[in-house]
Image: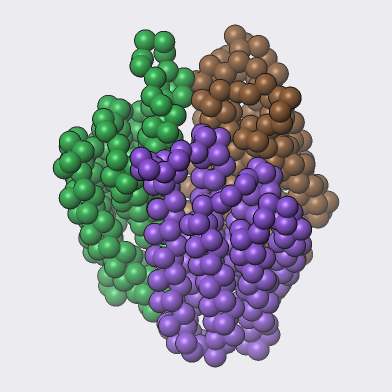
Chain colours: A purple, B brown, C green
Amino acid sequence: MAFRLTPHERGFYPLFTRAAENIVAAAEELTKLVAAEPSGRPVLAARVKDLEHTGDDLTHEIMVKLNSVFVTPFDREDIYRLASSLDDVLDAIEEAADRIVLYRLDALPAGISVQADVLLRAARATASAMPGLEKLDSLREYWVHVNSLEDEGDEAYRELLRDLLAPTNDASPLDVLTVLKIKEIVETLEEAADAFETVANTVESIAVKEA
Amino acid sequence: MAFRLTPHERGFYPLFTRAAENIVAAAEELTKLVAAEPSGRPVLAARVKDLEHTGDDLTHEIMVKLNSVFVTPFDREDIYRLASSLDDVLDAIEEAADRIVLYRLDALPAGISVQADVLLRAARATASAMPGLEKLDSLREYWVHVNSLEDEGDEAYRELLRDLLAPTNDASPLDVLTVLKIKEIVETLEEAADAFETVANTVESIAVKEA
Amino acid sequence: MAFRLTPHERGFYPLFTRAAENIVAAAEELTKLVAAEPSGRPVLAARVKDLEHTGDDLTHEIMVKLNSVFVTPFDREDIYRLASSLDDVLDAIEEAADRIVLYRLDALPAGISVQADVLLRAARATASAMPGLEKLDSLREYWVHVNSLEDEGDEAYRELLRDLLAPTNDASPLDVLTVLKIKEIVETLEEAADAFETVANTVESIAVKEA
């Protein structure tokens, strides 16, 4: 059953584009943070925190709009899910940046840079795709792209877990508190990657219905 | 688009008030438990478990009612989400109480009392707000209040994590299994605080639609 | 308010039966894996991985069908939730199987076999119940059964956590990295059990509406 949103309802899509662009900015700061010396990290984490506040405002704006306009219910849940999963991405990025500083971590494993890079590429793909929600094109390609990035992130995540918990004999073992700190950070970054996949699945779902 | 629930449908709201009051009772027992000597904890954890069973019955009653009456679908998901997130709060409170006893923990860090106190205040705010769902007043104030409690809980949570994983030199270090046990409990209490925020966001969402 | 799905819409139910039967196959391999010698595990984990891919295809087929046919919205969310929670079960089973191999674990605690057995029985109960979605019978019994299995799984889970984190004096203590590895696996298996409970709750919800 095909239908079209009215122009009023299309007002959601610019907000989603802004939310996704805001995530790109946060992922850029995260990428710098995981490459930075420990002394340079707090200022970058503070920027990520600011961007998270901006994201919260955008999520709230979308939710208020969602609750005050008429949209057929079956889209309503898609819009809710899309806004929530974009919010989840940014929360996880902010939490990871915060914990790296809070735990006074020294060197980070190289795999964390791979995770951050995957998130940055997923953020850029998402921001590029959002205007397509209105025009309903190029979305299939975006969905395939994010799913392939998710596989790449998952591989980095598995290798990080293996190196943390089952290190080979030639690796110098980390003390257990350091293992716990890093494990929490890589899990949080994996949550961000999973939330990008939920974003992509929801976009696909909207696109199929409107096609 | 404004609309009103019929009297029949308003029957949900007393159930939500009872569910929230039941959570207040559980949060009161939790507050006592985290202040008690280890020997006094099992009886308090058993009371929390009983209250969780009462909560399960209330959730089930709401879900059966939801499935057997006509409500416009876009409210249906709100009601589902509200019942589920109240259930999540109580599950997390019960799990935290259970684990403190199961792990035979001795002294608990002071921050856990802060977390429990935040949960009790959020529970009371929620129970006070629930009758407002019918009259649609005072809900904005409640939403702001719970969000500010969530910030307070989050700060206690971050400090607990930092003290557990990155203790300063003058703190006597805990053994790693104790770190793992306490970390699990503070994470579970943080989940309860997050679920209260979901409750508040859903209440706000219902209020906006009905306004 | 009772209503009936049209024959076209009933096309979902055979897909759910296939998804549940696929989970039975995965749970059978998991049961073998947790009983196997370490050297025999990788081939079994590879089979679970293959079954997870099959499950992903089935989930995608259900979602595409859901997005392209007309169903009243209030069922739509139930169908979405049912497909998602079946997907969650299989993801968790695959993740647990993968981690056992990835972490090169040696002997596993006996409680993990109990968890795997509970999952297999829940999978079989679910696969037997799915055709009942169409005929709307025997579903109450299934719901009670899965909830009782969930209690059984929860008890095994609690005992595993207690033995890992608060071992009695006569148990030979595990090294902390082994505790972390096993804790992650038992938590993942508990997630699978929880997801089966969500499946059962959603099935009950659909049954009540259609009754």
Across the whole image, how many numbered discs are drawn on residues? 0
- Quarter of the image where one finds residue A63: bottom right
- Quarter of the image where one finds residue B175: top right
- In this rendering, the answer to whether B201 lies above or below A28 is above
**Rendered location of residue B135, percent (x, y):** 78, 53
Whether residue C163 is visible: yes
Quarter of the C terminus of chain B within the rendering? bottom right
**Rendered location of residue A62, percent (x, y):** 68, 71
Give the residue at x 39% y 79%.
C68
**Rendered location of residue B151, percent (x, y):** 76, 46
Give the residue at x 56% y 15%.
B42
**Left or right of B143: which side holds B16?**
left
Give the residue at x 39% y 19%.
C173
Q: Nearer the viewer, residue C131 or C120?
A: C120
Q: Nearer the viewer, residue C16 or C51?
A: C51
- In this rendering, the answer to whether C95 lies above or below B29 is below
Whether residue B51 is visible: no
Give the residue at x 47% y 87%.
A138
Quarter of the N terminus of chain B within the rendering? bottom right
- Quarter of the image where one finds residue B126: top right
**Rendered location of residue A192, percent (x, y):** 54, 60
